[in-house]
Image: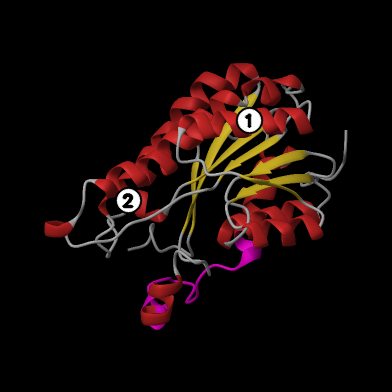
Amino acid sequence: MTTNLFDVEGKTALVTGGTSGIGAMLARGLADRGAHVVITGRNEKALEEACNAGLVALQANLSTPDACRALAAQVAEEFDHLDILVNNAGATWGAPLEEFPDSAWDRVLDLNVQAPFTLTQALLPQLLAKATEDDPSRVIMIGSIDGIRVPSTASYSYSASKAAVHQMTRHLARDLGPRHVTVNAIAPGPFESKMMAHMLNEFRDEIEASSPLGRIGRADDVVGTVVFLSSRAGSYLTGAVIPVDGGMSTTR
């Protein structure tokens, strides 16, 4: 057994939505530490750049259950097992209460809640293939602090979806623990990403001031948490929702 509690070298990981934002941070962070990383995304140029950087990149739109199952089949062709599944792909929507459309619920909940459930379900054979009591496979959900606290934005379907992801994490953790699979969630605060770009451009000073640490998240902050959860150091943790937000959701 390795003496390095935080070693992920040689592990096989799938990161959905891995071409930008937090997903790209996590994919690069795991790959830099020796993991074999597969990412998914929709942007062909970004996928090509990821391939050139040594990642396995698969084009996928995970908005339907059939698409999730198709991706699982592709992953099964590439790898006989999966050590780490990071369910990161997601979407948001903002509109005033009086104008909030029905379509914003279907689009956001299908991708943010249905997709991680279906993909975890479809990839169970790969997750179980080499999972042991001492070295369980890991499912890591990317939630949000907006699923913990009420956000300042009118993103009703997004905050509801992330609260659902947190509860789904606990539910799956209970059922998959006996099968040597841990399930945890990270609830990020604001990080540099396409999803946060408008808010950071407009309100960066106020957002940073809302954190006791006085800044937004950096790549190392979220990568460190995923490496911990994926390594031997995190093998006895399951069903947890970890806010990585500089204290924004826990001190105000």
Q: Quadrant of residue 189?
A: bottom left
- Quadrant where the C terminus sits is bottom left
Task: From the viewer's perspective, tell me whether residue 180 is left or right of residue 104.
Answer: right
Residue type at mark 2 is Ser
- In the rendering, at what x and y percent does residue 29 appear? 72, 57
Segment tinted magenta in the rendering = 204-221
* Residue at the spot 61% in from the left edge and 62% down from the top edge: 221
Q: Earlier in the sequence, mark 2 or mark 1?
A: 1
- In the rendering, at what x and y percent does residue 10 appear? 85, 40
Name the secondary structure under disc 1. Answer: helix
* Residue at the spot 27% in from the left edge and 56% down from the top edge: 150
Q: Is residue 40 a member of the stretch shown in magenta?
A: no
* Residue at the spot 31% in from the left edge and 41% down from the top edge: 106
Asked whether residue 239 appears in the rendered view, the answer is no
Q: In the image, which disc is placed on residue 63?
A: none
> Which residue is disc 2 drawn over?
159
Q: What is the residue that sits farthest to the left in this orientation?
A: 98
Q: What is the residue that sits farthest to the front in this orientation?
A: 44
Residue type at mark 1 is Ala
Mark 1 crowdedness (10 Å alpha carbons): few <14, some 14-19, many ≥20: many
> Which residue is disc 1 drawn over?
72
- Marks 2 and 1, how far apart at CA: 27 Å
- Quadrant where the N terminus sits is top right
- In the rendering, at what x and y percent does residue 153 appear? 27, 64
Asked whether residue 6 appears in the rendered view, the answer is yes
Name the secondary structure under disc 2. Answer: helix
* Residue at the spot 67% in from the left edge and 47% down from the top edge: 39
Q: Nearer the viewer, mark 2 or mark 1?
A: 1
- In the rendering, at what x and y percent does residue 188 appear? 49, 56
Q: Is residue 154 above or below residue 170?
A: below
Q: Is residue 205 a member of the stretch shown in magenta?
A: yes
Determine whether label 2 and label 1 are within 8 Å by CB: no
